[in-house]
Amino acid sequence: MKTVFKMMCVLILFTGMQISAQEDVSTTVIKLKDLITHAADAYPNEEPQQIYLLVETDATGVSSDHRFYLEQGVQLLLKRLQPEDKVAIGTYGGSNSTIVSYTKASNGGHILKELQKVYTITSQDTNKDGIDMAYQFAKNYYVEGTENKVIMMRNDQIASQNIVSSTSKNKKQKKTREAHEEAGKPYKLGGAIAITALSILPEVLEVIKD
């Protein structure tokens, strides 16, 4: 009976160690256009790598303005990784999916071919969370003795579009407020405006920091 109890304790301890290890997925957040610089500065790395590249997209994918940065960045990363290192690619934002499962850097041709899917989004699933999917994917395929990481690439063009859109809305709201004031009617700020302000706050802070 004591032997069975000891075996159960060892099993529980071993399972706990595995769960703890699988949670050790590091994160690097960069702008999409900075992938080239990041690949040049951070690699090669002596420790084996398993990297999930997470690309922010809008409703139509990644714009042509950012294709150069993405393609050249991925190409340089693949060249600087060890042949046995692995890369996966997924999207979040306008599209939420994993488009390339973990593939060895030595098979760069396949990775670059599948990367083309990022440029044109034909279907969307708003019920999914691309960020959560990426981390779950990384945990499911966690490799001991390897640096498991997610490199999240924020698309600053989308942030700019959000700010421009918000500015346009604010101008319309100002005109509406002025019209109400001229007519002697009170104008109240709705909850939607507060939500919009909160949603763009991180983007505004990003612009200020730059």
Image (tube, rainbow, N blue to C red):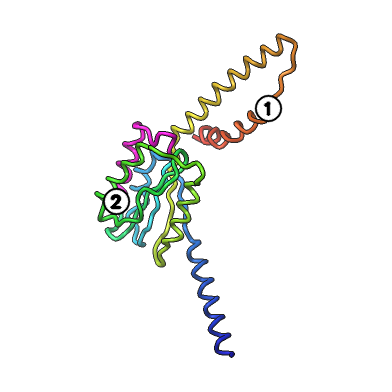
**Residue 64 relative to residue 205: left or right:** left
Q: Secondary structure at mark 1?
A: loop
* Residue toward you, 198 or 91: 91
* Residue toward you, 49 or 101: 101
Q: Is residue 188 above or below residue 6?
A: above
Looking at the rendered image, the quarter that the N terminus falls into is bottom right
Position in image of residue 183 (x %, y %): 72, 9
**Residue 27 relative to residue 45: left or right:** right
Q: Main secondary structure of the magenta part?
A: helix
Q: Secondary structure at mark 2?
A: helix
Position in image of residue 88 (x %, y %): 36, 52
The residue tagged 2 is 78
Query: Mark 2 or 1, which is nearer the eye?
Result: 1
* Residue toward you, 120 or 157: 120
Name the kind of residue labelled 2 in the image.
Leu
Q: Is residue 192 above or below residue 131?
A: above
User: What residue is shown at x 75% (from left), y 11% (from top)?
Assistant: 184
Residue 190: numbered disc:
1
